[in-house]
Amino acid sequence: MRGLLRFASPKFWLPTVLALLVAGLLWSWVARDNPYVLPTLSSVGQQFVDEPELYVSNAATTLQEALLGLAAGTAAAVLLAVAIGESALVRRGVTPLAVILNVTPVVAIAPALVVAFGFGMTPKVIVTGLITFFPVLMNTVTGLRSVDRHVLQVFRTVNASRLDVLVRLRFPSALPYLFSSLRVVFPLSLVGAIVAEFSAAGARSGLGTLITVASSNSQLDRVFAAIACLAVMGSFMLLLVTVVERRALSWHDSQNR
């Protein structure tokens, strides 16, 4: 109930509404004198009225790619983080490779993945997974190693097993760090899916493909309509992970301030 009252308060939604109004006014001002730079908001909105099924179907394809890649990248990162936290040998061997993978431009890898796996969903899921992998890995490793030393000493005093320490102490301590990275990678997964679609010249669906085709035909209103879809999807994904975080970490000090 308190959460609903908080959302209903003007202090919560009024700044966002005012910011959107200002942004809309600036957009309209620029679009009026520069039609080849920005389409008018009315023309972008008209796209959704004229062809709603086009944007829904392509958005569904991109969202599916993003969620599959996000799930794969997050699962791999968490499992590897646990291995790094439990073994110094794994940490010394794997961490440099993870850093190298992180600094390698995914845009350069994407075309090779398309050549290797074709124009289906597989290369797009891999690209999305690669983009989301490193932030989750680093944050989870940091969280697993951030346990209170005094509490850890208590666990050792009662001869708790390594599994008990991991499940009952290290992983709960890592949850705030994990959710912090998820707030970044949830919307970022859409970027990964779009990058992969840009690289797959023969792809037939997806918002990235829609943007590529519309750009080649100078259809700015369609381009920005697709971008608007991405913005809405990213906002809802961020809202989702925020809500889940508040529920999962209701016991943590960060949610009670």
Image: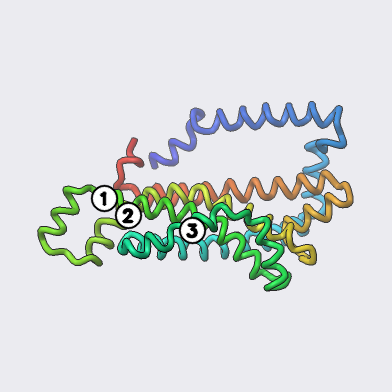
Q: Is residue 166 above or below residue 146?
A: below
Dot 1 crowding, Cα within 10 Å, few <14, some 14–19, many 20+: some
Lateral position of residue 215 relative to residue 25, left or right:
right
Most foreground residue, 167 or 141: 141
Per the model, the C-alpha gap separating discs 3 and 1 is: 23 Å
Q: Is residue 144 above or below residue 9?
A: below
The structure residue drawn at horizontal position 48% and vertical position 58%, both measured from the top left corner, is 98
> Could you tell me how many numbered marks the image carries?
3
Q: Amino acid at mark 1?
A: Val
Lateral position of residue 201 relative to residue 234, left or right:
right
Per the model, the C-alpha gap separating discs 2 and 3 is: 17 Å
Q: Which mark is residue 147?
A: 1
Name the residue beneath numbered marker 2. Answer: 144
N-terminal of the pair, mark 3 or mark 1, is 3
Dot 2 crowding, Cα within 10 Å, few <14, some 14–19, many 20+: many
Name the mark nearer the viewer: 2 or 3: 3
The secondary element bearing badge 3 is classed as helix
The structure residue drawn at horizontal position 67% and vertical position 61%, both measured from the top left corner, is 110
Q: Position of residue 189 (x, y in %)?
A: 58, 55
Q: Quadrant of the N terminus?
A: top left
Labels 2 and 1 touching (C-beta < 8 A): yes
N-terminal of the pair, mark 2 or mark 3, is 3
The structure residue drawn at horizontal position 54% and vertical position 58%, both measured from the top left corner, is 101
